[in-house]
Image (cartoon, rainbow, N blue to C red):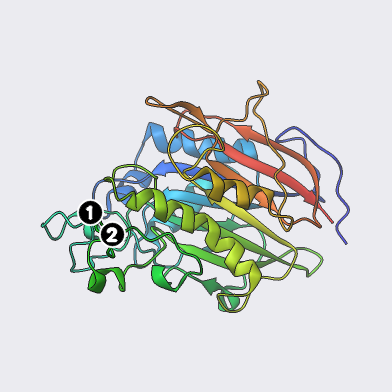
Amino acid sequence: MLLLLLSGLPGALTAETIRLATFNTDLSRKGPGLLLRDLQRDNAQIDAVIDTIRRADADILALQSIDWDYDTAALAALQLRLAEAGQHYPYRFAPKPNAGIASGHDLDGDGRLGEPEDAWGWGRFTGQSGIALLSKYPITTEQAIDLTGLLWHEVPDHRMPVTKDGLPYPDAETAKMLRLSSTSHWAVPVMLPDDMPLWVMSFHAAPPVFDGPEDRNGRRNADELLIWLHLLDGTLGPRPTPPFVLLGDANNDPARGEGHKDALSRLLTDPRLQDTLPTDENGLQHTVIWESTGPMRVDYALPSAELQVAASGIIHGKGSRHGLAWIDIRR
């Protein structure tokens, strides 16, 4: 049993508090190796991202939009920079994402091959804009559940796109090979100080825009959200056992912008999860402001129903367009 003190302010925490956070860092670059290069030199944006993470002082931190590489060299460099700033995360988890992995097929049906849209998940190179987990507590990587390679047509009640003639999009053969996850979907247990495993589920869904009348990205986004409910139902194989928390970027707001709102509503209102509705210092719930849509809430930290939430909040900084969403939990 964890004994926690209530706290609503970042930095005003005791050693007994377990803080979980999710942060779209905007640490993605246009070519492989460029993020590692920037982490090894003076860079104002990276300094600002590190400052936001330092202010949050999370114990378990899910990151989005951070380029993946085979040796996780960029993530290791970020760990070093964070340690120099006083934030020590000795444990990391960052399996290979779908982002940027060439499919060899014309996935968007535009007659051209080798484009970022033709990767299993959008990307100019393998691992562009991946996701990762940093933790102050041990991560039991060998027990991880990885749904990144799950084929879209294997998902129950999927919303795969069709052509104007009602046929599989872009064609039947290609549709059978499509992976659902645009980046990654995985769950991994983190061992808390009382030897209790806390399952951390994480993802970064596709933006439900940049497509045509077939609504490929909107449909994909919806199923990327609903995959968590199927996982908890046990229809996709082994499922995480409570307690667990879902941390990630859904690229979907409950009311504003594009996207299938019913899918997000089902996720946010599922009785196995709880939405703490975190706010920033001004009492606002948005985590990002897009020029085309204005303020939107797209980043979520959703603990399982039996966890007690002591506090929650959003921290905005200058390094990323997104705010960092955090929650403090107690059992």
Please say whether residue 80 is visible from this viewpoint: no
Write the residue at 78% across / 70% down: 195
* Amino acid marked by disc 2: Gly
Q: Disc 1 marks which residue?
A: 116
Q: Are marks 1 and 2 in contact (CB under 8 Å)?
A: yes
Q: Give the secondary structure at mark 1.
A: helix
Residue at 28%, 54% (x, y): give it. 123
In this view, which residue lies farthest toward the left?
111
Picture quadrant of residue 99: bottom left
Locate residue 160 relative to residue 54 in the image: left or right: left
Q: Are there few (<14), some (14-19), or many (20+) residues within 10 Å of tag 2?
A: many
Residue 191 visible somewhere in the drawing = yes
Question: SS of the residue at dot 2?
Answer: loop
**x, y percent for residue 169:** 27, 61
In the displayed structure, would residue 155 be above or below residue 224?
below
Q: Which amino acid lies under the numbered mark 1 shown in the image of this protein?
A: Pro
19 or 86: nearer the viewer:
19
The answer to whether 210 is drawn above or below residue 101 in the figure is above
Left or right relative to 155: residue 117:
left
Comparing 207 with 155, the one in front is 155
The residue under the point 29% across, 42% down is: 210
Report the residue marked by disc 2: 100
